[in-house]
Image (cartoon, coloured by chain):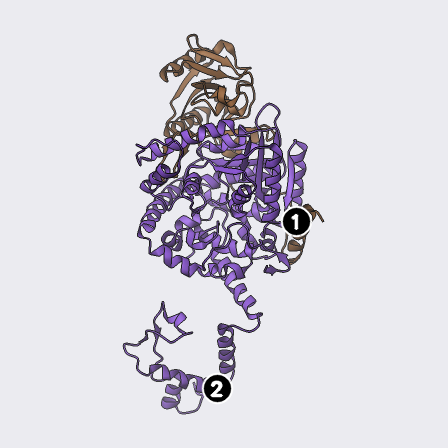
Amino acid sequence: MTTFLGMPTAPRGVGHLRGDDPFPVAARRSLADAQLRRNLAKATATIRAKRAKVTAELPDWEELRAAGRAIKTRTMAHLDRYLEQLEAEFTSRGGIVHWAADAHEANLIAVDLVRATGATEVVKVKSIVTDEIGLNEALADAGISAIETDLAELIVQLGHDRPSHFLVPAIHRNRAEIRDIFLRQMDGVDPGLTDRPADLAGAARRYLRQKFLTARVGVSGANFAVAETGTLCVVESEGNGRMCLTLPDTLITIMGIEKVIPTWTDLGVFLQLLPRSATGERMNPYTSMWTGVTPGDGPRQVHLILLDNGRTAALADSVGRQALHCIRCSACLNVCPVYERVGGHAYGSVYPGPIGAVLSPMLTGIEDNASLPYASSLCGACYEACPVQIDIPELLVHLRARHVDEARRRWPPGLEAITMSTAAWAMADPARFRSAQSLGRLGRVGRRRGVIGRLPPPLAAWTRARDAPVPPAETFRHWWSRTHGDAHDRP
Amino acid sequence: MTAREEVLGRIRRALGASPDQVHPAPSGDAAAPGYRTRSTAGIADLVSLLTNRLSDYGSSVRRCTAAQLASAIAAALAGRGITRAVVAPDFDPSLLPIGVECVPDHDFTAQELDAFDAVITTATVAIAETGTIILDGSAGQGRRALSLVPDYHLCIVLEGQVVSLVPEALARLAPQRPLTWISGPSATSDIELDRVEGVHGPRRMDVIVVSEP
């Protein structure tokens, strides 16, 4: 387990923060899928246009972004205090708060809570954090089936697939593929099902209705938790969230510790920023808020699991900390030229796209997601789109530097470290530098058209995707001494 | 050490690791926020904006006076062919139309609620700019399941409940009540980002805005 300033990161072997392959390998595989690229291009273009329209409508959009950033900065600076306040308020209203240092602990707590009810089935609201910790697998191991009730999550679950976007986890599937999945996997589905989105949504409604009406345990994440009042908040569109949060007897909410916000008033900022940035709507169809237990209304057992799982390791990095400000709107995914072409799976983590490229390595330790900070051209579109002004390009560069620094401390040194220290030695002395340059001119041997197409390994790693220019016939220093003599100090 | 002490201890170490950071005061910014927290729009403009937003969401909006409310409810239900509705136990019975079976909630199970075509509720606050109606379980609204399970929701909003902005709505709400914010009917864009209305929540929602004398 890698640590930054001695802080434990998310453990290996549980959950979905690490892919099987590094980004370049996975990305090459995704790029070969033309259907995937068509689905992504269509979806991201649609959502970009909607977002642009509704954010332009607000005269104070930039002020809201600045306020969002300020609130999150303040939250992180006093995170311990706000979490204790949240716990006290939620508990005083009849809720029960649990703490989990990592994914294993959170899964254990959740499994025990479900077991205590005797239920063998839970209904779930879409929650990325439960996917981060691999909750469904932990429940399955305990003989409990978790039913995803968000339409896109259901498509992913029935297709034995992985989510690829925060908001639209099945963004990589088109209607024909979804119809095929439903026909194959959905119990009692009408065999004459068409691929019209309305019919597909209707099939999901019929399939899930009885499950909602009889469910005894609901599991959710939380978009926001207000420290001042102890209030939890979930935003959604379909009503599956309201079903899971309202009808079961027991409700278990799992939340990353960074989701707390200080005050009730602060909610007014985020409830404007999130829907407009996420779905491009003025407001999402449904938002639910609850504070502990309300007698006669909704679940009688209400639990909240507060999860670290590497978040304190991110917090310890005073530059990287701002990645914890993310409200999971996915605006940065939708504007990213890299995401638009490779999709979410290539990132290997439940947190894809630009924010995932910085958040995942900080949660796992950079060593375990070392290729992600390089999965960007640093064009800056993500920073412009981010509703809480997270400077993602700055973070990407920061993490690249951290990666190099951490690699430098390792023994034996890697090829890059050896190359760099050799270069430093050569450049530190005029005579050595002159000899090195003459050596470089050997690169001209046998080259044509001014480029070096391919070098032998290990230098092939560079030339595989790039042309290197052939060194000039004459160096500047050589030209100077030929035309001006050897007097280096002449103007 | 408990997990609680472990996590809080890590947070304190993480924050202590960057003493160069100037931590802003936890009490919030002293200066007024730069974003809008109050609007000066008149009630007529607010109601007209709310009506536009709700129509965008596919809701039909009726306007009436308090005296006309009972007949407006009857007309709305008739327009949707509703014959059986559920209401909160404290819903004003004088407003219920004759000819439609309106049953006060008495701890119906979710399955029993599913047998009703419709629910009629009051509201607490409405936000014009976003077309949002907020329920908090106070008089005439009932518990959350009531406005969730039946397929049609008829909601009564008083003019005085309409505000312009999201921050104005929060200022009027009691955070400890169970809150449901509704902005149009249940919807999904999960298939190719094509908007489909009517997934799990009520597939239709209509609104009556009542002007007060």
What label does residue A456 carry, if any? none
- Residue A383 in the figure: left or right of residue A8: left
Q: Residue at x 67, y 47 (%)?
A: B3
Q: Amino acid at mark 1?
A: Val
Residues packed near mark 2 inside 10 Å, few (<14), some (14 to 19) or many (20 plus): few
Q: Secondary structure at mark 1?
A: helix
Instruction: State which chain disc 2 sits on.
Output: A
Residue A106, x across and y down, in percent:
60, 45
To which quarter of the image does residue B55 belong? top left
Q: Which residue is mark 2?
A: A432
Q: Secondary structure at mark 2?
A: helix
Q: Is residue A174 above or below residue A347?
A: above
Rendered-image quadrant of the C terminus of chain A:
bottom left
Q: CA distance from mark 2 to mark 1?
A: 53 Å
Q: Are marks 2 and 1 on the same chain?
A: no
Q: Is residue B204 above or below residue A257?
A: above
Can residue A67 be seen? Answer: no
Q: Which chain is brown?
A: B
Rendered-image quadrant of the N terminus of chain A:
bottom right
Q: Residue furthest right?
A: B1
Q: Which residue is mark 1?
A: B7
Image marks 2 and 1: residues in contact by CB distance under 8 Å = no
Q: Residue furthest left?
A: A449
- Residue A164 in the figure: left or right of residue A255: left
